[in-house]
Image: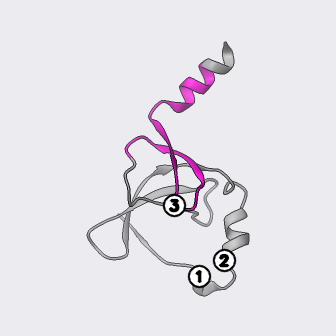
């Protein structure tokens, strides 16, 4: 019974979805198509962000759990050159 209670409580205000790459993500409940999962250097967990009407500006929607991306796997697998990194502005 304790597991069910903890699982239920941890899902409050959260939503399960699948990325275009097929990864399972648990994130904020108000996510919509076009939102972006990202790894922010210095943060302990991945985040979901949403582009704004200003090019290069993004709104932070909240932290997320991304299957296969919680321990630096995405950084090690995809960032081979500093040119792969992107600077963005938070709003």
The residues tagged by marks 2 and 1 sit, at their Cα atoms, a distance apart of: 6 Å
Residue 10 vertical placement versus 42 (above, below): above
Inspect the magenta stretch and tell me whether residue 13 lies in it: yes
The residues tagged by marks 1 and 3 sit, at their Cα atoms, a distance apart of: 19 Å
* Numbered badge on residue 20: 3
| Relative depth, front residue between 52 and 77 | 77
Sequence-wise, the earlier of marks 3 and 2 is 3
Q: What secondary structure is found at the residue carrying circle 1?
A: helix
In the rendered image, the quadrant that contains the N terminus is top right
Question: Disc 2 designates what residue?
Answer: 79
In the rendered image, the quadrant that contains the C terminus is bottom left
Image location of residue 9, percent across then percent down = 54, 25
Residue pictured at 28% horizontal, 73% vertical: 54
Sequence-wise, the earlier of marks 2 and 1 is 2
Contact? badges 2 and 1 (CB < 8 Å)? yes
* Numbered badge on residue 7: none
In the drawing, does residue 70 fall left or right of residue 34? Answer: right
Residue pictured at 51% horizontal, 78% vertical: 86
Contact? badges 3 and 2 (CB < 8 Å)? no
Image location of residue 53, percent across then percent down = 26, 69
In the drawing, does residue 77 fall left or right of residue 86? Answer: right
Quadrant hosting residue 88: bottom left
Residue 72 vertical placement versus 56 (above, below): above
Q: Which span is picked out in magenta?
A: 5-30
Q: What secondary structure is found at the residue carrying circle 3?
A: loop
Image location of residue 38, percent across then percent down = 54, 63
Decide: few, some or many residues near mark 1? Use Cα within 10 Å; few <14, some 14-19, many ≥20. few
* Numbered badge on residue 84: 1
The residues tagged by marks 3 and 2 sit, at their Cα atoms, a distance apart of: 19 Å
Decide: few, some or many residues near mark 2? Use Cα within 10 Å; few <14, some 14-19, many ≥20. few
Residue pictured at 67% horizontal, 66% vertical: 74
């Amino acid at each position: 019974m304790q597991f069910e209670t903890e699982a239920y409580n941890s899902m409050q205000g959260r939503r399960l979805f699948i990325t275009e790459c097929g990864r399972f993500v648990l994130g904020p409940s108000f996510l919509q198509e076009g939102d972006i999962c990202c790894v922010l250097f210095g943060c302990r967990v991945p985040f979901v962000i949403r582009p704004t009407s200003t090019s290069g500006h993004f709104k932070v929607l909240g932290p997320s759990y991304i299957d296969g991306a919680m321990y630096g796997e995405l950084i090690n697998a995809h960032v081979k050159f500093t040119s792969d990194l992107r600077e963005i502005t938070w709003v």
